[in-house]
Image (tube, rainbow, N blue to C red):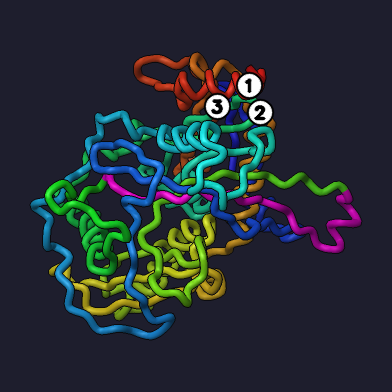
Amino acid sequence: MAVVSGSETNRNDDWLEVLRKYSRFNTLRAPSVIGHYSQVCNGDVFMDKREACRSETVPDGGLTSLCWDLNRGLKEFEWRDRHNTKADGLKPVLKWILHKLRNPGNDELKQYPRPSAAEVTFVFKRAVMTRILTAPYAKRESTGGWRLRVCRFQNTIYLCNDKTFGRWRVWTEEEKVKIYRGSGFETYLTSHIQPVDPSSYKHSEAAGYVTVVLTELVTEQSEQSKRTEPSASKARLFVLAAEVDGELDGRSHESPPRNYVELKTCHRRHQLGSREYSRSFRAHQLLRAWAQCYTVGIPRIVFGFYDNKGIVRSISTFKTHELPGMCRDVWSDAVCLNFADDFAKWLERCIEETDPLREMYEVTFEPEHSKMRLRRVEINDRRLSILTPDFVEEMKLQVDGS
C-alpha cells in the first residue's frame, strides 16, 4: 500500500506485503475502564450513567427462536441532527478529560486509574480504531474510503473521523431502515439502568452511554526476530471512547468491560444461506464486530437475524476471542494489528506539533488506489479544529502548573 505525504511525495511502501510477514505479532493489552459519560439526544454530555442500559442475559452458544418486529417505533425515532456541533468529533471525549482533571476527588471517578497526559500517545473514539484495523480488508471501491482529522498537541496525537468526507449525508430510506433496525434490536434486549422520565426520553440515534478505556498496543517478537531486531518498539498507550450497547445484568457477571455486550443485526440469509453468504458474513460483519469489541475488551457479541420484513427470527452469541479462528480463511487479526502498529508509527513519525486551533493534518484512505494520503491543512470554517479552545487552554495550564 503506497503512502503519500502531502500532494507530491510518494513513498512506495507496500504495507500489506510487509504485514503478512509474521516475524512480529502486535496485540492490545487487556483494556481497563478509566471512566464513562452519557450523551443525550440533543448532543449534551453528562458525566454519569443516565444512558446506560441493562441487557438481558443471553446464551453463549446455539440459537434462540424469536419473533421481534424491528420496524416498531420507526416513525417516532429521532435521528441525530447532523448540523448540531455539540457532539462533533472528539468534543464529548475532551469534556470527559477536562471533567476528570477538574474533579480528581470525585467519588464516582475514584475507582478509575488516572494516567498522566504525557504518557498517552493517542486519543480517539473506537470508530477510528475500527477503520484502521479493518483497512487491510477494505473493499476496493470509492465508498470504502475514509478521512481522519489529526493533530499533535503536547506530544499526544488526537484523531477523529471527518464526517464531511464520503456519503453520510445521502442515506437512502432503505439504508435508514437498516440502521434503525439495529437500534430496534437494542431496544428489545435492553432497558435503562437508571430510571428515565418517559415524557422526556425519546428513542434517539444521538443518545448513548460511552465507556472510556485505556489500552496499549505492544509488539510480541518471535525468537528469530529478537535476534535480528533486538530493540523492540515502545508500547503505544491509547485512550479510546466507545458506545456500550448494554451491560449484562446479574451479580455473577464481571466488572466492566467484561460485562459489556455488543448487539448487532444481520439478514438471516447470512446465517441460513449458501456458503457464499456465510463467507460474506465472516468476511465483513464478523471482522467489523471483532475490531469493535476486541479494541475495548467487550467479550461477547449478540447477533439478531431478521427476515425480509425485519422480523428477528433468531439470535446467536459469538465470543470475541474466538472470531479470528472462525474467520481465518477470510481475514487475520495479525494483519489487522500489524497494520495498526505501522499506521501508529507512521503518524508518530510524520505528524508534527502545531497550534491545534490553527493547523492540523488530514489522513485520507483510498482503498481503490491502495493509498494513504497525508497533508497538513489550515483550520477554517470548513475544516474545524479537533480540539476546543477551552481544552487547549486548560491543558496548557496543567503543564505550566498555574
Find the magenta span and give its range.
206-230
- Residue under the image location 69 percent in, 31 percent down: 349
Classify the position of the C terminus by image quarter.
top right
How far from the left and from the top, in percent, is residue 129?
Answer: 51, 47
Give the spatial CA distance, label 1 vs label 3.
Answer: 7 Å
Q: Amino acid at mark 2?
A: Asn
Q: Amino acid at mark 1?
A: Glu
Which of marks 3 and 1 precedes in the sequence?
3
- Residue under the image location 30 percent in, 83 percent down: 64
Residue that mark 1 sits on: 353
Q: Is residue 223 magenta?
A: yes
Q: Label 2 neighbourhood size at 10 Å, few (<14), some (14-19), many (20+)?
A: some
Say if residue 146 shows up in the picture.
yes
How far from the left and from the top, in percent, is residue 121?
Answer: 64, 38
Q: Amino acid at mark 3?
A: Cys
Residue that mark 3 sits on: 151
Q: In front of the other: label 1 or label 2?
A: 2
Classify the position of the N terminus by image quarter.
top right
Q: In front of the other: label 3 or label 2?
A: 2
* Nearer to me, 289 or 44: 44
- Relative to residue 227, is residue 269 depicted above or below? below
* Nearer to me, 255 or 330: 255
How far from the left and from the top, in percent, is residue 222?
Answer: 81, 62
| Labels 1 and 2 touching (C-beta < 8 A) | yes
Give the spatial CA distance, label 3 vs label 2.
Answer: 10 Å
Residue that mark 2 sits on: 155
Q: What SS does tag 3 mark?
A: strand
How far from the left and from the top, in percent, is residue 40?
Answer: 28, 43
- Relative to residue 266, is residue 358 depicted above or below? above
Say if residue 371 shows up in the picture.
no
